[in-house]
Amino acid sequence: MASAAQRRIKSISYAKYGYIFILPFFLVYFFFQLWPLINTFIVSFQGNGAETGEFVGLENFKHLLKKVTLTTEENRKVLGILPVESDAEYQELAAKKMQGAIHDDFIRSFKNTLVLWFGNFIPQIALSLSLAVWFTDAKLKIPGKGFFKVIMYMPNIITAASVAVLFMSLCSESKYGAFNQLFHSLGIVDELEGPDRDVVKFVTNKWPARFVIMFIQTWMWFGNTMIMLMSGIMGINPSLFEAASIDGASSGQVFRKITLPLLSPIMVYTLVTSMIGGLQMFDIPYLYHAGNVPNKEVSTVAVFIYGHFHTGQKYQNYGYSGAASVLLFMVTLLLGSITFYMNRDVDAIAKKKQRKKLAKQVKAQNKQFGGLSV
Amino acid sequence: MSKMKSVYGQPKDNYMFKIRLKSGILFFWCLILTIICVLPIYILVINATRLDTDIAGGLAIVPDKYLGRNIRAMKQNFGNLFKPLIGYRNSAIITVSATFLTVFFSALTAYGIHVYEFKLKEVSYTVILLIMMVPTQVTATGFLNFMAKIGLVDTYWPLILPAAAAPAIVFFMRSYMKSSFPLDIVEAARIDGSGEFRTFLTIAIPMMKPAIAVQAIFAFVANWNNFYTPSMILLSSKTEQKTLPMMISSIQASDKTSDLGVVYTCIALSIVPIIIAYVLLSRYIIAGVALGGVKE
C-alpha cells in the first residue's frame, strides 16, 4: 500500500508545463509562418494591382502558365502602328500583351533557377566530395588541412549582398573591371577601351552572367558542403576502410563500394537542402546587374516573386507573386519527396513488411483458437 | 636475408613515394583553391585603399595609402546612401534580438518536448520536423501581405519576432538534449524544491551551453547577412532605417558608382567586421558545421 504522500507525488502531472514551454514557439509559428503560408494560398486566388483582395479564382495561375501570343496585327495595334477600332479593344489587347509578358517572365525565371542550380550544384558537389575524401584519407598526408578548411569555408560567412556587389565591380565591363584587366594582362583580351573595345561581357551577356553567378554560388557553398561531407565520412566505421585496404582495394574501389553507399544519408540531406536553397536563390541574381533593372537572363523565381510584391507603386501584384509561390511550394514538395523516395532504405522497408506479415499470421492463427493467445 | 630485403623493400619505397607525390599534388591543388577563395576579397581590400584612377590602370598587389581619402569621399558622395555606423547599429539591433529569441525559445521548446510527457508531445515534434522543410521564400508573399494589413511594415518587429520559431534549431537542440541531458537531473531539482522554470533557466541552459553557442553563432551570421526579409519589410527608402546589406544594395543601384575606389571601400566596410569575427571564431564555426549545423 502506498502512503498518501507517495500517491500524491505520483498524481502530480507536469504535462501542463510541457504545453506552457512549447506554447510560445507554436504561437509565433502560427502568426508568422503558418498563417502567412495559408495567406499566400489565399492571395494567389485574388487579384493584382487595384483589384487586390478580389477573388479571381485560378486566373493568376492561368496567366503564369498559359502561353499567350499576339498576332503581328494585334501587336501593331497595341504599339499604335495600326489604328484600333475602340478603346475597349485596345485595353483588351494591352491586357493580353501583359499576360504574355508575365508568362514569359515566369517561365524564363523558372528555367534560370534550374540552370543556375544545376550549374552550381554539380561542380560544388564534385569539388566538395573529392576534397572531403582526400582530407579524411588516413594514408594521405596533406599539410595544413585545418588552415584549408578555414579558408574554404570563409566565403560562406560573408554577406551575400556584399558578395554580389563585389563581383559586380570585379566583373565590370568597363576598363575598371578587375577580371577584364587580368585577362588583358594575360593577353586574352586585346583592348579595354575605345571603339574596338574587346572585353568579356560578364554582366550583359546571358551565359557569361550566368556563369559568374554559378561561380559565386559554388564559391560560397563548396566549403560548407565539404565540411558536412567530411563529418559524414568520419562517421563511417574506420575498420571498414582498413579491411578494404588489407584486401587490396584501390582508392577508387573504396570510394565506390564503401564511402559513397554509406554516405548516402548525408548526401541526400545535402541534396535536399541545396535544392531548397537553390530554389530560393535571391540575393545574388537580384543584385547582379548594371543599372536599375534586374538582369532578366539571370533572374530566378524568387526574384520574380519579389518583383511582383515589391512593385514600387501604390498597389502590389500579390496575386502573381502568391501564385508563383504556390507553384514553387509544389515543386519543392515534389522534388523533396522524389529524393526521399529514391533514397529510401529498401531493405528496412522489406523487413518491416515481413514483420507485419508475420504479426498478421500470428493473429490469424490465434483467431482460430477463439482469440486466445496460445 | 639481404635478397629478401631487396625484393620486398622496393615496392614499399615505391608506395611511400606514390603517397607523397599524391599528397604533394593535392596540396598544390588546395593552394590553388585557397587563392581562388581569397583572391576576390584580397582585390577588394587592396582596391579599397587605392584611387579611382589607379584602379583603372590595373591590378595591384600591395595596398596604397588612400583609404582615408576614400572614406572622406564616401561621406561626401554616398553620405545619404551609405552610413556605415548607422548600418552597423541597425543590423546589430535586429541581429542581437533575433539571435536571442531564436536560441532562447528553441531551447525552451526543445526542453518542453524532451522533459515532459504530454499527449501532443509526439505530434508537436512531428509538426516541427515537417515545417522545417518549408522554404521561407514560399511564405514571403502571405507574410508581407499580412504585415501590411496589420501595419507592421517599416518596423523591426517582423524581422525580430519570427525568430522565436526556428524549427531546425529546435530539432538540433532536441537531439543534443537526448544525448547529454539526463532527466534524473530534473527529478533531483524537483525534490530540492526548484520550480520548473527555474530548473530550465539555472540548470538546463548552462548544461546546453555548447549547443546554444553554436546555434547562436549561426543565427547571428544568418540574421546579419539577411538581405531578403529586411528589404521586403522596410519599404521606406530612409537610410536611417536600413540594415547594412540594404545599404550596400542601394549603392549598387545608384548611378553615382563612378568612383570605384569608394565603392570598394563601402563593400570592405560591410565585409571586414564579419571576417574579423570569423577569424576569431572559426574553430567553433567549423565544428558547428560539422555537427550538421543549419544550412541556410
Image (cartoon, coloured by chain):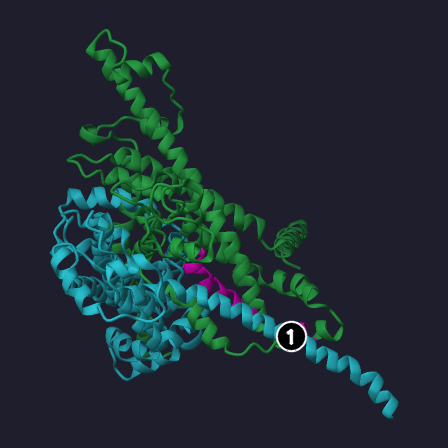
Chain colours: A green, B cyan
The chief SS type of the magenta part is: helix
Q: Which residue position holds label 1?
A: B21
Amino acid type of disc 1? Answer: Leu
* Front position in the image: B18 or A275: B18
- Residue at position x 12%, y 51% in the image: B238
Residue B274 shown left or right of residue A116 in the figure:
left
Q: Residue A271's spot in the image, x, y percent?
A: 50, 54
A321, A288: nearer the viewer: A288
Instruction: Indicate whether residue A20 is drawn in magenta.
Output: no
Is residue B250 shown above or below B3? above
> Could you tell me residue A285's position as x and y percent?
35, 47
Query: What is the span of residues highlighted in magenta in the rendered image?
Result: A218-242
Q: Is residue B195 left or right of residue B138?
A: left
Quadrant in which the N terminus of chain B appears: bottom right
Tell me residue B81's x, y (percent): 15, 54
Q: Secondary structure at mark 1?
A: helix
- Residue drawn 32% across the image and 49% down it: A174
Question: In front here: B296 or A5?
Answer: B296
